Each structure stands twice: as C-alpha cells, then as structure tokens.
Image (spheres, helix red, strand yellow):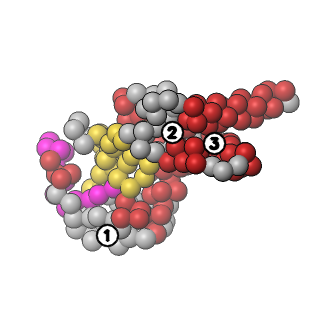
Amino acid sequence: MASDWSFFILQFALCLIDVIYNIFDPIGSKYANSDFHFIENMTSTFQAFIYIILKFVYSLLVCSMNLSEILYKWIKKISDNSVIEPEVKAIYFGIFETQTGYSLYCTGSIAYDSDNDDWATKIDFDPAPYVKYFAVPAEAIVGKDWNDVLTEVEQALKTIFSQKSENFLFNNLIITTGFDDGELIRVK
C-alpha cells in the first residue's frame, strides 16, 4: 500500500517541479515555443493549482498506459476514419523528432519494395490531417534517445499487429516503421 502512495506522491511532485521550473526558468529554453509558458500569465494561484492538478491527472493516465495501448488508440482512429484503396500494399509509420519529443505519422503506398526504402515516399494512402499525426506523450518516452524510441515504437507496432482485429484497416498490409532519414524496419 505504501508503494502505491509513493508512486502518486512522486508523480505529483514531478508535475509540481515541472510547473515551478517553467515559471521561474529565466531563459525559457527547456520548453521554448511551447504552451508551458502560459503559466506566467495566470492571474491567480487558483489557476496555477488547477493546472498542476490537471497535469498530474494527465501524467497518471499516460503512465498507466503503455506505448502499445496509446498507439493502438491512434491507429484505431485512423482505421475508423479512413478509406484505403485495395492497391495499397504497405503502410509506413514514420517517426520524426520535434522540439518537445517525437511524433509519428501514417502513410501508405502501392509501390512497396523490400530492397529500396524509397517506396515510402510514394504516397498513395494519406489519412485525414486530424488523424495522420500523433505526438508521442513525453511521459511514455522520458529519458529515451532516438534509438530507444525506434525500438519502443517497433515493439508496440508488433504487439498491435500481432493481434488480429476484424475491423482494422491495415490487417492484410505490410507494416513498416522508422525515422525518415534512416532505414525502414518491417514490422509485419
């Protein structure tokens, strides 16, 4: 029981430290151009308190889910909101680094070639913009470098696509992932 409470206290403390750091960060370099600096404009202690509580709850929700669960929800959203042509052979889950972490995007192609990764640049399936991109929550990859992120995404996709789901758009397609400037990894 004590370990359960210590986890919650640690999460709350991390959120509080993060918020305080962003309020008093003189350079603003850690989260430059992010929404964290809106805290400086809060007019009351109550607003700051509410923000800390919401950030704490969000971090608990993210920490209680693993990357496979988080990615599954995003891929399910793409599947539910997209139509794919029968000629499409492969799906590419591209990974790229952002100022605040990592993001993924989804595209597909009819020109799959296992010997030449350039097929992924020939886009024949392009989901709607509101489901195409996915920002990986920082809490899911804290302390990980790009190679660890690639490995985690690969393993999460393998887990997702090893479980057949009748209503999944990508069930019969080749699935790949990787960074745009690196080699692609075939997941399925």
Which image quadrant for residue 187?
top left
Q: CA distance from mark 3 to mark 2?
A: 9 Å
3 or 1: tag closer to the N-terminus? 3
**Residue 176: where, in percent of width, then height?**
31, 47
3 or 2: tag closer to the N-terminus? 3
Q: Is the residue marked by circle 3 packed among few (<14), some (14-19), or many (20+) residues within 10 Å?
A: some
Quick one: SS at disc 1? loop
Residue at screen point 29% across, 58% down: 107
Kind of residue at disc 2: Ala
Residue at label 1? 84
1 or 2: tag closer to the N-terminus? 1
**Residue 155: where, in percent of width, then height?**
44, 38
- Could you tell whether 3 is left or right of 148 in the image? right
Please state which of the two labelled residues, at mark 3 or mark 1, is closer to the viewer.
3
- Could you tell whether 4 is left or right of 62 in the image? right
Labelled disc at residue 138: 2
Q: Above or below — where is 68 with respect to 19?
A: below
Residue 30 magenta: no
Q: Which stretch did the figure color magenta?
A: 106-117
